[in-house]
Image: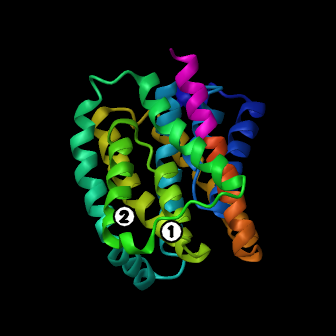
Amino acid sequence: MDGVLLQFGFGGWIFLLTVGALAGLVKGVVGFAMPMVLISGLGSMVSPEVALAGLIVPTLVTNLWQALRQGARAAWAAIRRFRLFLLVGFGVLMASAQLVPYLPKPLMSLMIGVPVTLYAVVELTGRAVRVPGAAGRRGEAAMGAIAGFFAGFSGVWGPPTVAMLTARGTEKTEQMRVQGVIYGLGSLGLLWAHVVSGVLNPVTLPLSVALVPPGLLGLWIGFRLQDRIDQPLFRKLTLWVLLVAGLNLLRRGVLAI
């Protein structure tokens, strides 16, 4: 157990806890990107497997807070409203997960990064993309399928989900709650999967637990900032973070080729 914890000196722990707080802050402001910040920061000090283990518990805890911030009734209402997105997404996720042994990892990153980056760029240049209201449940099911397809072989729900919610013009409080619900359910699956896989184990669990307090502190600060910004600024910040996420996926894909 001490193997992972004792490999960091004082400066290393300051860096790790700062990364945890920054990841929580970003999530508190825009509702997503915590795993992206954590995996990038932790990955500079530990192996990819340990970095993945490190993000599991703080991601689960912060998602639950985000989902339940307005109460269990509001969270349940979000599940009911977006149940088609969740059900279709989960079904496609289970199917696309079977592609993992056959798809090259660079291709996975590029398949997500290209459309997400293009969407963010188009939106930031003032050419609004919207899911037509007439599409209704059909449009929601289609976006659920897209998000589930990418999540199945990459574990990435965030960019496709945020793109769907932003394109539908979702109000910021509801968008934050819906993201918390979707990612929270996904985090439970991630926890179970990596307990089974052995990635989260008695050696790596202490690191993951240690990142919970700074993550919660950052999330609390982020929530306070998010409460003070209006819908247009929230949308713009969301798009910028989405752009960074998309470019990061492109970078990973290109460098791994």
Q: Position of residue 9 (x, y in %)?
A: 72, 28
Q: Quick check: is 84 in the magenta stretch?
A: no
Quadrant in the picture for residue 132: bottom left
Q: Is residue 45 above or below residue 223?
A: above
Q: Amino acid at mark 1?
A: Arg
Do the residues under discs 2 and 1 have CB atoms within 8 angstroms? yes
Above-or-below relation of 222 to 102: below
- Mark sitting earlier along the chain (2/1): 2
Q: Residue at x 71, y 60 (%)?
A: 236
- Region of the chain picked out in magenta, as a range: 246-257
Dominant SS type (magenta) = helix
Q: Label 2 neighbourhood size at 10 Å, few (<14), some (14-19), many (20+)?
A: some
Q: Residue furthest bottom?
A: 73
Q: Is residue 253 magenta-colored?
A: yes
Q: Residue at 52% of width from left, 57% of height from top? A: 162
**Circle 1 is placed at which residue position?**
168
Q: Secondary structure at mark 2?
A: helix
Q: Is residue 21 visible?
A: no
Residue to which mark 2 is pinned: 139
Q: Secondary structure at mark 1?
A: loop
Give the Cα distance between marks 2 and 1.
10 Å
Mark 2: which amino acid? Gly
Give the image's coloring scheme: rainbow
Frontmost residue, 7 versus 231:
231
Residue 32 percent across, percent down from the top left: 57, 55
Q: Residue 38's spot in the image, x, y percent?
A: 60, 41
The reply to whether residue 206 is visible in this rendering is yes
Q: Nearer the viewer, residue 44 or 12?
A: 44
Residue extending farthest to the top is: 257
